[in-house]
Image (spheres, rainbow, N blue to C red):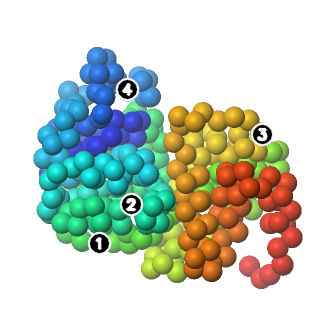
Amino acid sequence: MRISVLGGGAFGTALAISLAANGPVTLWARDISALQDRRESPRLPGAKLPDAITLTDDLATATQADALLFATPMQSLSALLTRIDAALEGVALVACCKGIDLTTLTGPAGVLRAGKPQGIPAILTGPSFAADIAHGLPTALTIACEDDAMGTRLQHALSTPTLRLYRSSDVAGAELGGALKNVMAIACGAAMGAGLGDSARAALMTRGFAEMTRFATSHGARAETLAGLSGLGDLALTCTSDLSRNYRFGMALGRGDAFDPDITVEGAATARAMARIAQAQDLSLPICDAVAALTEGRATLRDILDQLLSRPLKEE
């Protein structure tokens, strides 16, 4: 299977480095000069690009593959698809981004279906940091594809000696778990940044997981998918580690500190999208609503805390 990774950021580069253990990989980026000069990403110091990786800034060349891994920010996915002239009939289109598109209010699989309906959409997601993958640390992810035959092919083609993939046909569960856990990571980061303590974080993770599962299953996902790598596993990682951008962003909010605007924080956009969906569908998503209000400056952390703690008591 010929594989191309579209996106030369930390995660896309890390995937290319790991996949190069299996054979040739093409890595596309808008600007490949930094990668070409040293065969190393400035975002992944110490992780050299193997010779099996071919670098290109030509999108037409990169898309001549059997599987395209889209390692771009969620809000950029649709625009990238419009730049690809080929129909990509029968090509596996693997979204490696997590979130909800603010324009269509759909996940990455929906964006892929709309942009390239002749391709076969799939989701690669789960608890992982780019540096871990790039440096060959053991990592397990979910590959979700409704086409069982393609899902099996992708599972074998994208698994490496240090990257283990578990197969699922539940695309909705995989993409919603990956999207919603970022919102919860912001909430947990805000709690820790404000000094609310580990008990508060544990409560937010637990109730956040219930919120994730409730929303996802109401939209066709399977509960067991949310309890797996793409949901609970990813939630545990991003709500507890300073390596998580969403968690660090939440900590900055909790402390009242500024945050680097050049760092992509998918959970902020996802929270806004989820708040719009909740309003349109009359759903109760208190943590998503709270994070949306906090990130948009519509409420302070104190306001949100008072609101959450004053909710009616109920059975778990």
For the residues marked 4 and 3, what is the alpha-carbon distance in whole angstroms? 31 Å
For the residues marked 4 and 1, what is the alpha-carbon distance in whole angstroms? 34 Å
| Of callouts 4 and 1, the N-terminal one | 4
User: In the displayed structure, does residue 314 sit left or right of residue 54?
Assistant: right
Looking at the image, can residue 181 be seen?
A: no
| Of callouts 4 and 2, the N-terminal one | 4
**Callout 2: helix, strand or loop?**
helix
**Callout 4: helix, strand or loop?**
loop
Res 260 → quadrant: top right
Which residue is denoted by mark 3 in the rendering?
A: 255
For the residues marked 3 and 1, what is the alpha-carbon distance in whole angstroms? 43 Å
**Callout 1: helix, strand or loop?**
loop
**Callout 3: helix, strand or loop?**
helix
- How would you rate the neighbour count of disc 1 (Cα within 10 Å): few for under 14, some for 14-19, many for 20 or more? some
Q: Residue flagged by tag 2: what amino acid is it?
A: Pro
As displayed, is residue 103 above or below residue 68? below
Can you tell which mark lies on residue 146?
Answer: 1
Residue closest to the eye, 156 or 6: 6
Residue closest to the eye, 147 or 307: 307
For the residues marked 4 and 2, what is the alpha-carbon distance in whole angstroms? 25 Å
Kindly check if marks 3 and 1 are in contact, taking CB atoms under 8 A apart as contact: no
As displayed, is residue 5 above or below residue 155? above
Can you tell which mark lies on residue 63?
Answer: none
Kindly check if marks 4 and 2 are in contact, taking CB atoms under 8 A apart as contact: no
Foreground disc of the pair 3, 1: 3
Foreground disc of the pair 1, 2: 2
As displayed, is residue 7 above or below residue 35? below
| Of callouts 1 and 2, the N-terminal one | 2
Which residue is denoted by mark 4 in the rendering?
A: 41
User: In the displayed structure, does residue 259 sit left or right of residue 98?
Assistant: right
Residue drawn at (80%, 52%) of the image: 300
Residue drawn at (33%, 40%) of the image: 7
